[in-house]
Image: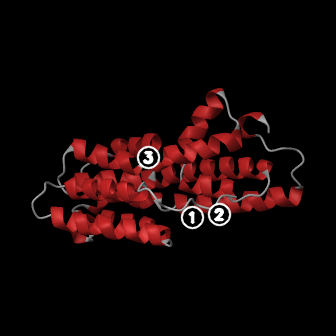
Amino acid sequence: MTDGGAPSPSLPAERRRAVLRQGLSVGVATGAYGISIGALAVAAGLSLWQAMALSLLLFSGGSQFALVGVIAAGGSGAAAITTSTLLGIRNGLYGLQVSRILGAHGLRRLAAAQLTIDESTAVAVGQPEPAASRLGFWVTGGAVFVLWNLMTFVGALIGDLLGDPRQYGLDAAAAAAFCALLWPRLRSSDGRAAAAVAAVLALLVAPAAPAGIPVLVAAVAAVVVGLRPGRPAPATR
């Protein structure tokens, strides 16, 4: 394994091109969606630079949409941050697997931590060769990071020009965008069970709780369901 994720010279040129195409295509498709978080952030009351800081520093779609959604609903900063943090726990779990693949140290390890997201992890673990895994991670993570932040900037500019977001239905777009991110992950029975329990609890809590608390309760419920004992171990490559 090479240090810092540099691709091994033994990786055939054809495989290298295939991994590059996969990583870049995922990066373009995911990065383009960043326009929505920029528009939603300014619609929720954040400034352009606050929206940019959110994408540059947090850089996690699900967590960003959750945070913006809570703020847009009038929730407290504490509820927004707590909800976003709970949803970001998965990135830390990804890091346990990705660190073994990359073998990165120093500044490269810091960069890898920032780029450890759903897409970069999926492309990395989906490769049969260690060198291809490392290349896929860096290409995908880098492409998503650059395009996500660029499109956040564009979305924030557009959103600032739109005026009242309720004219265009943007006040409900955070929830719709979050559901769009969640839907592809509900293929397993465990995922559907966690989503069902979280949704029921959120609906029960919503009438009496302040904005942001139902999302927080749903996130905690999903974590509890996911960590319950007796679940079969997931298959590994």
Residue closest to the far top = 106
Q: Residues within 10 Å of mark 3 (few under 14, many from 20)?
A: few
**Cβ atoms under marks 3 and 1 closer than 8 Å:** no
For marks 3 and 1 on the same chain, the one whose residue lies earlier in the sequence: 1
Q: Amino acid at mark 2?
A: Ser
Q: Is residue 12 above or below residue 58?
A: below
Q: Is residue 115 above or below residue 201?
A: above
Instruction: Please tell me in which quadrant of the rendered image residue 62 appears.
Output: bottom left
Q: Nearer the viewer, residue 98 or 31?
A: 98
The residue indicated by pointer 1 is: 29
Q: Amino acid at mark 1?
A: Ala
**Cβ atoms under marks 2 and 1 closer than 8 Å:** yes
SS type, badge 3: helix
Q: Amino acid at mark 3?
A: Ile
| Residue 188, horizontal then vertical, whole percent | 50, 71
For marks 2 and 1, give the CA distance.
6 Å
Residue 89 marker: 3
Visible residue check, residue 41: no
Which of the two marks, 2 or 3, is nearer to us in this view? Answer: 3
